[in-house]
Image (cartoon, grey):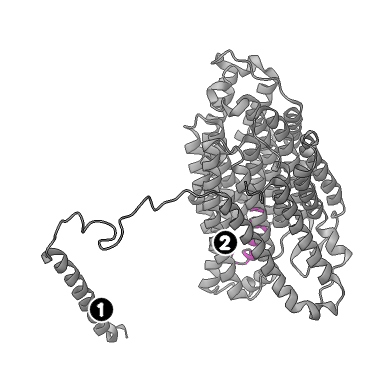
Amino acid sequence: MPIAIGTTDLISILPIAIVSLFGVYLLLQSVFAPRMNRILIPYLGILGVGLAVVGNFFLIGMEGTAFEGMVRVDRLTVVLNFLFLITAALSLLITISYHEGEHVEFLEFTPLVLFSTAGMMVMGSAESLMTIFLGLETMSIALYVMAGFRRTNRHSLEAALKYFLLGAFATGFLLYGMALTYGMVGSTNLTQIAQYFTQNALDVPLVALMGLALIIIGFGFKVALVPFHMWTPDVYQGSPLPVTAYMAVGAKAAGFAAILRVISLSAFSIAFQWSEILWVLAVLTMTVGNVVALVQDNIKRMLAYSSIAHAGYILVGVVASNDQTVPSVVFYLIVYLFMNLGAFAVATMVAGQNERRVNIQYYRGLGYTQPLLALAMAVFMFSLAGFPPTAGFIGKFYIFSAALQSGYVWLVILGVINSLISVYYYLNVVVAMYMQQPVDEKKIAPVLPGVGVVILVAVLGIVYLGIFPGTMLSVLR
Amino acid sequence: MLLQYIPILVLSVIALGFAAAVLILTHVISPKVKDPVKLTVYESGLPPQMEARLRYPIRFFVVAMMFILFDVEVIFIYPWAVVYQQFLAYGSFIFWEMLLFIAVLFAGYLYLYKRGAFKWE
């Protein structure tokens, strides 16, 4: 079997390679460079991400597989690469400001973000179960370490350990599922798996179905679907805020990228059986996420449950499994990127040193002490709740219309009811900011440039995608 | 079909029941002597000197972890070595591939070294 690695192969992983190389380089830089220059590491990380974005432009228009059918490059790959890279860049920008407040050495932080981003991009461009697993592990192991970065904080350690143990357990499920699927199909290639399921559509062997079910469990853990969501609030609460932001957006997007790759390819033929399972999962995820979020008074936990609920909305798009699935899900992921990173950026600013001010009571009166910050937070909250002029509305609209197209009327009704429930806790923050007196007179530190850029980009993204969604949607179709 | 396995079921029930009965009976009717000497760790040996749980430096753990890391990496080299000759016929890619792998590992090693993972202080 000849293995020939041509230029096409190398170009197809160009962004991944650039990010990985920068990761290794910055890891060495973090120990070899003189202490003064180490402050530059996050900036160099952003430079690396920027170069990878440039590299990603070379992938536009490519269509096909590389590395003997291990990697697929198509429009979805390119869009997902952009999504992951923007997430990484914005998270690094938040880190720069966070670093200035927190007395923790964040030396290895940038390389870990880069490695994790490389893993996400591998997942997004996977054409084989092996590639998905490789990407998932690269992403997860870096995230486990990042969750425990505030080493002196008990919650951070708890988050890291919990995430690691449960994550390893979920990986076990995933790997077992992949093994069963491989055992039945005889190949890890996603296209061949899809072929297998199409050929045996009338009578799919139980083992193959079990394999896919276990794979769903593995992914369900990563994107926090409801029976597998237990880790989410604790991990989101304990991790440092930039990590939470990065994890909430990046890991979720990567998980859904893998779900899209596996499910939308192989399960189209057996969509009937799948959609029933995913239907229940979606309703459970939306409902539990939204209802439990109602009683949270910690902004990180609130956003954690909100992220569970949003996983439910996105899963509605997956359940639809028609030609609208991929555009609507990816559009929602992009919107989710902006609103969640924005909200976490504001939370980072309000939380201040050592994250002392993470309760929602500290948002009281923010509209008068920090008008711009509060305005941005209000935009993010309205978008998360899905109010019309914002991108959150358009995202939900396309997800639900995709589901309607496939005839899931009840699913859409339940989704809309859930959106209504979510309005309460999102607007709770807005009410606190504009209609209540500040709880303490301590001034919040002025917005630092790094976080400021993130908030600005997020607000612009939400408003732009909310008013002119057409351009992005035509790209995704 | 399954009925022919009934004797096996009966046999296992009898076996389990007999074992359980013997265990419970000895526990109930056996004589019990409560003697302090009898309750020491080694009745006929030396008395224990200190706690069995020792504190030992965590650097053992670091070294063990690094050993496992690099040990696992070596495992990847074995299959590579097995197919090396065969793949060399298709070009030198296989050679550079492993060189790149080892270079990345070496970067990790350098990082550990500079971070002081090998300092025995």
- Residue B103 visible at all: yes
Above/below status of A361 relative to A391: above
Q: Is residue A265 magenta?
A: yes
The residues colored magenta run A255-270
Looking at the rendered structure, the kind of residue marked 2 is Leu
Residue A468 x/y as whole percent: 77, 37
Give coordinates of residue B63: x percent, y percent: 61, 55
Report helix, strand or loop for mark 1.
helix
> Residue at 67% across / 20% down in the picture?
A445
Question: Spatial distance from mark 1 to mark 2, Cα to Cα?
Answer: 37 Å
Which of the image's four quarters has the N terminus of chain B? bottom left
Left or right? Give the position of A287 relative to A25.
left
- Which quadrant of the figure has residue A107? top right
**Count of numbered labels shown in the rendering:** 2
How would you classify the magenta stretch by its main secondary structure? helix
Taking depth in this image into account, of A299 and A225 the one nearest to the observer is: A299
Q: Which mark is residue A65?
A: none
Amino acid type, callout 1: Ser
Of the pair B119 and A20, the residue shown nearer to us:
B119
Quick one: A81 or A444, which is closer to the camera?
Answer: A444
The answer to whether A182 is drawn above or below residue A425 in the figure is below
Please tell me whether residue A172 belongs to the stretch shown in magenta.
no
Which numbered mark, 1 or 2, is in the foreground of this view? 1
Residue topped by disc 2: A174
Query: Which image quadrant for residue A176?
Result: bottom right
Q: Which residue is mark 1?
A: B12
Badge 1 sits on which subunit? B
Q: Residue at x 16, y 65 (%)?
A: B27
Question: At numbered mark 2, what does the secondary structure look like: helix, strand or loop?
Answer: helix
Badge 2: residue crowd in 10 Å (few <14, some 14–19, many ≥20): many
